[in-house]
Each structure stands twice: as structure tokens, then as C-alpha cells.
Amino acid sequence: MPEALQVAFVLQDDSLVLDWAGPAEALRVASHEIAALQLAVPPFQLRFVAARAESTGSVGVRLQGLEPLPAQLPAGSWVVLVGRTSAAETGTQAGAQAAQRELIAWLARLAPGRAGLRLVTVCSGALLAARAGLLDGRRATTHHHHLDDLARLAPGATVLQDRVFVEDGEVFTSAGVTAGIDLALHLIAGHAGELVAARVAEQMAVPLRRGPADPELSPLLAHRQHLNARLHRVQDALSLAPREDWPLERMAALAATTPRTLSRLFAQHAGTSPQAYLRGVRLAVARNALQAGASVAAASEAAGFSAELQLRRAWSAAGWPGSPSGARRRAG
């Protein structure tokens, strides 16, 4: 068995537990699969390092026995930076500020992403990488709430919006929380093959693997950050039955209002039109069907498009990369 590949998860106080627990679990399962399949690739050795021996996670769990920040790591190791609940702040207590300064200095000295080390960030972990100057000249992303912070902290980086993750050489940055699992599966596939990644996803009950070209925010969740109950009623109905015929008059009846008023409410509260929202839902349903192996014709029908041509036109109008048939081929 080859020597293990070291993966150092860098933890701070208030670290978002799912940011590191999800990817760490994926890597743990991958090591078991590598051994079971007797593959000639290294398993993963997980390390949890910090500026202090103890840390409190986002849900209040107390983490003890954390390794001190290592002076060096073997070439080829991965350094994983995860987010914090107060990611946009540097910490209000003197101890927290001192620990973060120590961590940033350590990162700058170790230079992951260069010097033979791979840099992986989950959620707002990219902000820590930015403070250490590790993203200059790179393409990167982060949680959608922190995109402006990332652009401010890394003016030399190209910040990409609405991506699950971004790969730039040996630097991998991912969006919010669960996107870390998508990135971990992508990294596992690159290290040990697609079979291992698929078996890990199956064991973790991950229903859909997202890639670097997929949006961070699903159309099924977009345009719903509002408090208008009538609008939610219409959006729920469209999401539950996208195949049905949905003229504007029928939507308006669900909201107990007129078509004109419904259009105004959508524009005011959701920032889109009823027809555009329905089209986004249908596109999301069609893409999920394609990635599950359905034909373009079957995906069009499942999503409520009248024909394959209508799906292709909606796909192109939404600015999605590639085509429906290309999405199906990638899934295959």
C-alpha cells in the first residue's frame, strides 16, 4: 500500500462543522474503498490542525487535541480551509485575533497552492486564503453571501459567482457548506477514479453530484428569499407540478389575485416574472433527469416542456454551458 496522502483540515473557533465533517467523511469512506478495491493509489490520512489545541464548532461542539500548525507538510499534501460563522470578521477578542494572525502567517509561509501543496477551501475558507495572499492571480469562488468580501480581500483574484466549485491549478475553492462534499467527490475522482467517487456518493446517500459548471443555487431554491405567503403558494405549486399547464391566469387564481398583480408581486418580491420562474423550475427538473441518465426527449417531457426544441431554447436563454444532450453524455 502506498504511503498515505496527508489532508490537513485547518480549524478555527466557530468553524462550520459541515464544512469539514462532510468532506472529511467522504475522504474516510474513500480510503476504505481504495483498500477494498486494492487500488495502487494512496489512501487519505486526515489531520486536524489549529493555532490552538482546542476549538468550538458552530453548533457548540468542543474539539480537543487538535494538532499544532505543522512547520511543514509532505509534498503533495492537501490543506483544507473551512468557513466560520463570523467569516467576514477577524474576531473581536484579542485571543481570536492573535490566533488568526498566527494562522494567516503560517499559511503565507507554507504557501499551499504552490510549493507542492494543494489548497482546498470550503465556503468562507476562501476569505482566509485571500488574507494570506494565496488567491492572487487565481480564479476563485466562495459562499454567495461572501463574494463581495472575497473580491475586496483578494483584488488580484477573479471571483466567479454562482459556481459549486472552481479549479485553478492546485487551488480548489468551493461555495457554501454542502458544496464542500461536491468538491471532495470531485477530488476523490481525480485521485482514485470515478468508481471510488461513485461508491462514496452512494454510501453517503448524495443524490446528485454537482460539477464545476453547475450553479451554486438551484433554480428550485432561487427567488424564494421573501415573506410573501401568496407568492410562496404559487412557487410551491409550480415546483410540485412543473409538467402541468400553467397559464398566468391559473397562477393568479392560486394567489387569489389578478394576473397583472401577480406579475407585479413576482417582480417586487422575487425579482423575476412568473413565466421566468416556471421556466427555471422546469430547467432544473430537466437537468436532474438528464444527469440521472434520461434521454433529452424524456427529460423534456418530465419537466413540462412541449418539445425538445423548447428545452434547448430555454437552456440557451438561461446561459447554461453546453447543451441538454451534452449534459446527458457527461452523466453517462
Image: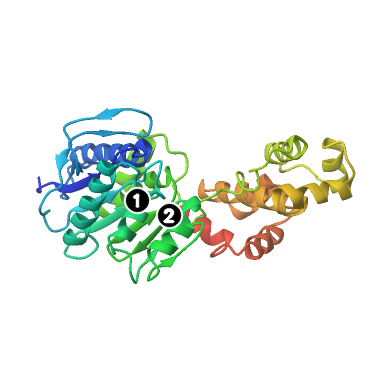
In the rendered image, residue 263, in percent from the top left (x then y), is placed at: 82, 50
| Crowd class of label 1 (few under 14; some 14 to 19; many from 20; radius 10 Å) | many
Residue at 52%, 61% (x, y): give it: 326
Q: Nearer the N terminus, badge 2 or badge 1? A: 1
Secondary structure, mark 1, is helix
Residue at the disc numbered 2: 142
Label 2 element class: loop
Specify few, some or many for label 2: CA neighbours under 10 Å numbering under 14, 14-19, or 20 or more.
Answer: many
Distance from Cα at disc 2 to Cα at disc 1: 8 Å
Query: Which residue is depicted at the point 56% across and 47% down?
Result: 288
Q: Going by the picture, which residue comes out furthest to the front?
A: 94
315 above or below 50? below
| Mark 2 and mark 1 residues within 8 Å of each other at the beta carbon | yes
Name the foreground residue: 215 vs 283. 215
> Which residue in the protein does label 1 denote?
125
Residue type highlighted by circle 2? Thr
Residue farthest toward the top in the current orientation of the protein:
61
Q: Nearer the viewer, residue 109 or 270?
A: 109
Query: For the N terminus, which image quadrant?
Result: top left
Q: Is residue 94 toward the left or the right of residue 288 in the image?
A: left
**Which residue is rendered at x = 61% and y = 49% of the image?**
219
User: In the rendered view, how is the structure colored?
Assistant: rainbow
Q: Position of residue 224 (x, y in %)?
A: 65, 43
Q: Quadrant of residue 16?
A: top left
Residue 237 picture location, percent across and down: 73, 37
Q: Which percent across, then down, holds residue 269?
A: 72, 47
Amino acid on which the number 1 mark rests in the picture: Gly
Q: In this orientation, does residue 11 appear?
A: no
Q: Is residue 158 left or right of residue 229?
A: left
